[in-house]
Every structure is written in structure tokens, then in C-alpha cells.
Image: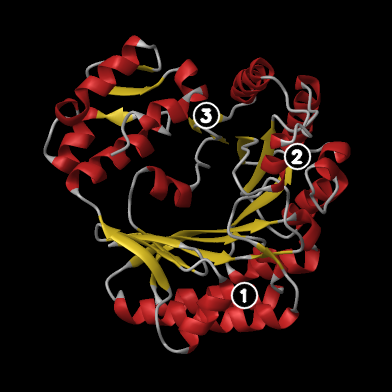
């Protein structure tokens, strides 16, 4: 059984006002030490339980994984490789905040076996970076990209955000052109989402955010898709663009609704049809593992109908869409039997396109993807 392994580090230097991930400002260095000890305990428990799995990818996410020292990441990755079977050319990704990494740490990470770097650049406009609470500058992004290349990295992703407070289409265009000058193999392009509980959500409720209009946001997304395509990037998932052969192996596990193991506070897993999550609170996570208990908080055995619905939703995130033959091979049923009404309605609304072999989001459907997905939720 081939799976992906996700490792969550929930600490950051500071909490960005738009962030709704399970992350917390790091207060004491000892927090990292105690958390790492718990993380090793959880990894070892699963290594003993899941004897027949083979890792096809490892992904360090957060939070900010690069708050850890290079040696700590090296040792953590080495433990995973020793305790689990792995594919020969396994993809190993680490998310990195440009303000928390230098050339020395990059060199250690590359020597450890990290072969894909995901940089949280977000923008190459210093005014906007400050406005969204980032701790780095545009110059830091450029410097760290050059240092990563010098350290041996040949696969770099750049995260870019759009529809930021006060942002114009022209400012996004400048950022993307500068990003292309850095020649990343992969670009993740995300529109700002105002999630309940975040500072930006509260500010918006109080009319304190100068957000671009919906038309401007659409123009930003439409221009970006066309521009990145002209630069040789394949738009293979709603928010993701890759040069040939550089699609994210790990993220495709999620989008294909395949199996994965998540370790760390708040991490999700999907193993043998059972999906569960860990407790979000790092203190509780550490406490439970210190007692030898897995820190699971919630879980469910998915029904066949729910598995089918989630597969359709996840496949629709990709530009490959839903292959009708592949769906039948997986579930032994034609996709139109459970979902024909929704599919036909969405085609009539021009949110889906396709033929007898497949269907996928239309250009309009990409921008209104959440509306499409809601039609399939069980």
C-alpha cells in the first residue's frame, strides 16, 4: 500500500491575519523540543502498526517547519526513512518561510534528502507583504531562491496570493512577472479567503479591509491563468501550475483521493477507508503521546456514497477532471447513476464541460468551484 506522509509543525514566528491553519506563535524554545519528542513517538507508533505501507512522498507543513533547526529536520527525515519503506525516488517537500531559512540550513536540508522546496512568498510587493503580516521582504524571497539553487534544489514551488487588501491587477502582474524571472518549477496561486476567526475576517466585518471587487478578483485570476500558460506552466489543479514533469506528487495524493498518513497536532489521515484527525492543541497532543496514546480526536468510516462524492469533488479540482471509466473501475458503478442530476444541472449552468469520457470544471466553473462542489456534498 503506497501512501503519502504529512508532518505538521504548528508553530510560527507570528500569526498572519488571514491564516486559519492550525498554527500558533512560538513562545518558548522548549515548546519545539517537547513537540519533537511527541512527533517521534507518533511516527514510531505508526511505523510499528503500518508494516505494509510504502511512502511515495513526505511533506513537512505548518505553521513554519523551517523554525526547526536544519539538524532537527535532518534527524526527523532520517527517522521516517529508516522506520518506513520508501519509494526509490520519493518526493520530499518542506514549506519554508523566507524569513526563517538561510543558505546553511538549505544545504543541510538538501543533504538530508529534501528535494522540493515550497516557499511562502505570497507577494513580491513589500507594501502588500507588510499589510498581510508577513515577516519577510520581497528581497528575502529572491535571495532565498538563489541560495536554494546554489544549495542544489532543482524543484521549487512559489506560493503567491492575490485579491489582497488594496491590491490592483497591475501589482499582481508585476509580482507574477518577477516570480517567473526566478524560474520556479511550480507555482501555487491562491485567492485571499476570509475565514471565520481570522483577524482579516473580523476586520472585514468592521469594514476595515479595502478588498478588490469580485470583478477585479476574477480578472486577476483570468489574467494569471493565461499568463502562466504562455510561460509554459500547466494549469493542472484549480490553484496550481507546473512546468512539465513537476506536478506535486504529494498534493496529487489528496486530489486523487488516495491514502495518506498525517502526524502532528491537527493532522488528518485517510487510511483503509477510515478518516480521522489529531487533536489540534499542541499541549494536548504532547500530553497524550507522553502517555503512549495516539492523539486522535475525531474519525469516521466513510460510506460508499461519501467516498464517491468526495472522489468526484477532489477529481474536479484537477484539470483532468472526472474520468468516467476510471470512476467505474474504482467503484463498479457509472458516475451518472448517483450524480447524474447534479452533473446535468451544472453542465446546463456551464460550470462543467466534457464529453462521454470525462467532465471537468469549465473556465467559469473554476472561479465558482465551491458552488460546484457543494452540489456533490453528502
Disc on the earlier residue, 1 or 3: 1
Q: Nearer the viewer, residue 213 or 184?
A: 213
Q: Which mark is residue 182?
A: 2
Q: CA distance from mark 2 to mark 1?
A: 27 Å
Q: Element under label 3?
A: strand
How many residues crowd mark 3 within 10 Å: few (<14), some (14–19), many (20+)? many
Across and down, in percent, residue 97 comes to 73, 56
Q: CA distance from mark 1 to mark 3?
A: 33 Å
Q: Element under label 1?
A: helix
Residue name at image x 24 percent, y 53 percent: 302
Residue 309 lies in quadrant: top left
Does residue 105 appear in this view? yes
Across and down, in percent, residue 67 comes to 72, 68
Image vertical order of residue 275 relative to residue 211, above or below? below
How many residues crowd mark 1 within 10 Å: few (<14), some (14–19), many (20+)? some
Across and down, in percent, residue 219 comes to 65, 16
Q: Which mark is residue 74?
A: 1
Whether pointer 2 and pointer 3 mark residues with C-beta atoms closer than 8 Å, the reply is: no
Q: Which mark is residue 235?
A: 3
Outermost residue toward the left? 332
How many residues crowd mark 2 within 10 Å: few (<14), some (14–19), many (20+)? some
Q: Quadrant of the N terminus?
A: bottom left
Image vertical order of residue 259 relative to residue 348, above or below? below
User: Which of the two marks, 2 or 3, is nearer to us in this view?
Assistant: 3
Image vertical order of residue 154 relative to residue 41, above or below? above
Amino acid at each position: 500500500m503506497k501512501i503519502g506522509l504529512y508532518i505538521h509543525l504548528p508553530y510560527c514566528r507570528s500569526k498572519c491575519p488571514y491564516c486559519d491553519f492550525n498554527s500558533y506563535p512560538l513562545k518558548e524554545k522548549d515548546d519545539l523540543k517537547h513537540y519533537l519528542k511527541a512527533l517521534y513517538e507518533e511516527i514510531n507508533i505508526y511505523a510499528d502498526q503500518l508494516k505494509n505501507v510504502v511512502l511515495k512522498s513526505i511533506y513537512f507543513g505548518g505553521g513554519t517547519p523551517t523554525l526547526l533547526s536544519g539538524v532537527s529536520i535532518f534527524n526527523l527525515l532520517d527517522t521516517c526513512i529508516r522506520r518506513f519503506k520508501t519509494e526509490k525516488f520519493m518526493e520530499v517537500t518542506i514549506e519554508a518561510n523566507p524569513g526563517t531559512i538561510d543558505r546553511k540550513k538549505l544545504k543541510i536540508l538538501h543533504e538530508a534528502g529534501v528535494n522540493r522546496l515550497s516557499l511562502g512568498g505570497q507577494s513580491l510587493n513589500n507594501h502588500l507583504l507588510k499589510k498581510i503580516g508577513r515577516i519577510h521582504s520581497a528581497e528575502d524571497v529572491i535571495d532565498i531562491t538563489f541560495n536554494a539553487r546554489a544549495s542544489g534544489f532543482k524543484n521549487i514551488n512559489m506560493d503567491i496570493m492575490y485579491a489582497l487588501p488594496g491590491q490592483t491587477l497591475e501589482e499582481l502582474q508585476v509580482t507574477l512577472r518577477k516570480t517567473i524571472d526566478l524560474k520556479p518549477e511550480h507555482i501555487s496561486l491562491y485567492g485571499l479567503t476570509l475565514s471565520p476567526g481570522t483577524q482579516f475576517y473580523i476586520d472585514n466585518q468592521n469594514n476595515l479591509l479595502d478588498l478588490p471587487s469580485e470583478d477585479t478578483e476574477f480578472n486577476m485570476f483570468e489574467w494569471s491563468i493565461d499568463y502562466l500558460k504562455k510561460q509554459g506552466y500547466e494549469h493542472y489543479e484549480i490553484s496550481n501550475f507546473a512546468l512539465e514533469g513537476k506536478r506535486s506528487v504529494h498534493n496529487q495524493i489528496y486530489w486523487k483521493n488516495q491514502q495518506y498518513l498525517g502526524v502532528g497536532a491537527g493532522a488528518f489521515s485517510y487510511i483503509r477507508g477510515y478518516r480521522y484527525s489529531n487533536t489540534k492543541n499542541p499541549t494536548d497532543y504532547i500530553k497524550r503521546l507522553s502517555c503512549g496514546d495516539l492523539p486522535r480526536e475525531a474519525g469516521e468510516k466513510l460510506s460508499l456514497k461519501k467516498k464517491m462524492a468526495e472522489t468526484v469533488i477532489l477529481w474536479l479540482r484537477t484539470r483532468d477532471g472526472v474520468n468516467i471509466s476510471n470512476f467505474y473501475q474504482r467503484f463498479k458503478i457509472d458516475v451518472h447513476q448517483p450524480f447524474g442530476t447534479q452533473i446535468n444541472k451544472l453542465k446546463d449552468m456551464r460550470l462543467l464541460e466534457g464529453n462521454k469520457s470525462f467532465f471537468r470544471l469549465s473556465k467559469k466553473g473554476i472561479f465558482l468551484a465551491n458552488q460546484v462542489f457543494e452540489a456533490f456534498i453528502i
